[in-house]
Amino acid sequence: MQLRYSFRLYPNGPQRSALARAFGCARVVYNDALRAREDARAKGGVFPKAGDLSRLLITEAKKTTERAWLGEVSAVVLQQSLRDLDTAYRNFFDGLAGKRPRMGAPRFKSRKDNRQAVRFTANARWKITAGGDLSLPKIGDVRVRWSRTLPSTPSTVTVVKDAAGRYFASFVVETEPGEILPGVAGRVGIDLGLSHFAILSDGTKIESPRFLRRAEKKLKREQQRLARKAKGSNNRTKARLKVARAHTRVADARREFHHQLSTRIIRDNQAVAVEDLAVKGLARTRLAKSVHDAGWSAFVAMLEYKAARYGRTFVRIGRFEPTSQVCCVCGIKDGPKPLHVRVWECRACGAVLDRDINAAVNVAKAAGLAVSACRAQVRPGLVPAQREETGTHRDGHTTAAGIPRV
């Protein structure tokens, strides 16, 4: 499988200027190609192919006065920009055909976008120097902070600048087949929530860190300062970076929490089951901020790819499975319950069930996993006696034991 590794870059002043030129040239070629195709569609003409666009918008454009500055950057960067547009159109048409989730049509890029990126392939002859720097064509040797070793030789590198002004080098590598973890006996179902981020079928509850909620006070203060700055001023640019960095710290902390928790679950369990949540639907409710703060989709995606990488079993059950309505002890469907009901008693068997742990156990059972709820808060309740077996009446009537008195 392919994995992506990201490392922090520290370009100097001239290198930042060269990267800015590369970002701008790639954006201009992308927008020119998008305009050419949209004009052809509006006129009902033939959709221009990638080869024709490359010759017209790169090779021929460099010879003109208006686009002569395209020659200041690597041609591979411009070619990859056209490929990105082809990918965007392909995903859009596949969504219309039902081959993948629907997404919008390609849109024009702006120089004010929060994220700028360029990609270098092997044809660009980029390399990692003996001193550990990243050598990029027409940019130079950029200092890299290597936090770990790449498992194999990467085929491409993408240089990304985020909203906070940080630079990253993103490598796509092929993983080696010898990374299978030793087998374990654990099998777990996971129920995701808001008050508790994750509830496992063995009774473990992981508290929700709520990174965004905890940082709201500081974010509000920085955004208020940004609103007071004059548009177009240097002070506004500085204030915008402070807001972006505050949001970046929240996103980084959330990502680190997801990585640590998903790795621990994958290492301790042979099989993992989760529910396919309708995050887009929940994000349109009054709980939208809390749903986005939890980041369920990113966490489930980490579980899925780590399970495939380390030889674990990952199962995703349907979102319409009534996990919160079925008793995990007797299997009777007890009907829907409002959200404020956290503990309920089964009307069939009398078991007292924790709502979240019961759902986690049902998630595992729906996935076909044999789980144990020995640590869960599930206990049998008092079973009421039958009416004909109760009472202490004398004079020939039955007693509590059901034996007539004489």
Image (spheres, rainbow, N blue to C red):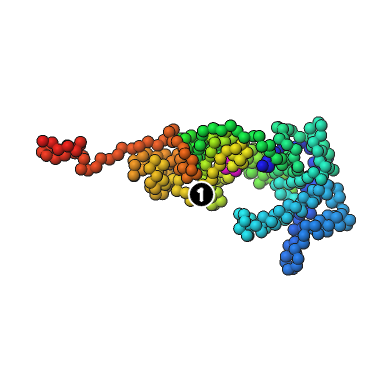
Q: Residue furthest bottom?
A: 44
Q: In the rendered image, which quarter is residue 248 located in?
A: top right
Q: Indicate whether 79 appears above or below 42.
A: above
Residue drawn 79% across and 51% down?
79
Left or right of 108, for residue 63 = right
Q: Give the residues in magenta.
A: 299-303
Which element carries disc 1, helix, strand or loop? loop
Residue at image coords 70%, 32%:
148
| Relative depth, front residue between 200 and 405 | 405
Taking the spot 71% from the left edge, 40% from the top edge, the residue there is 173
Residue 195 in view of the camera: no
> Residue 184 in the image: x percent, y percent?
54, 32
Q: Is residue 307 visible?
A: yes
In this image, 358 relative to 274: left or right? left
Front residue of 348 and 64: 348
- Residue 214 horizontal/vertical position (percent): 57, 37
Spot occupied by residue 3 in the image (x, y as percentages of width and height):
68, 41
Q: Residue at x 76, y 51 (%)?
A: 81
Residue hosting label 1: 318
Q: State which quarter of the image contains the N terminus.
A: top right
Dot 1 amino acid type: Gly
Tell me if 64 is positioned left or right of 5 in this view: right
Res 402 → quadrant:
top left
Pointer 1: residues within 10 angstroms few (<14), some, or many (20+)?
Answer: some
Foreground of the two, 189 or 213: 189
In the rendered image, the quadrant that contains the C terminus is top left
Q: Where is residue 240 shown, x and y percent of the image?
A: 69, 44
Name the dominant secondary structure of the magenta segment. Answer: helix
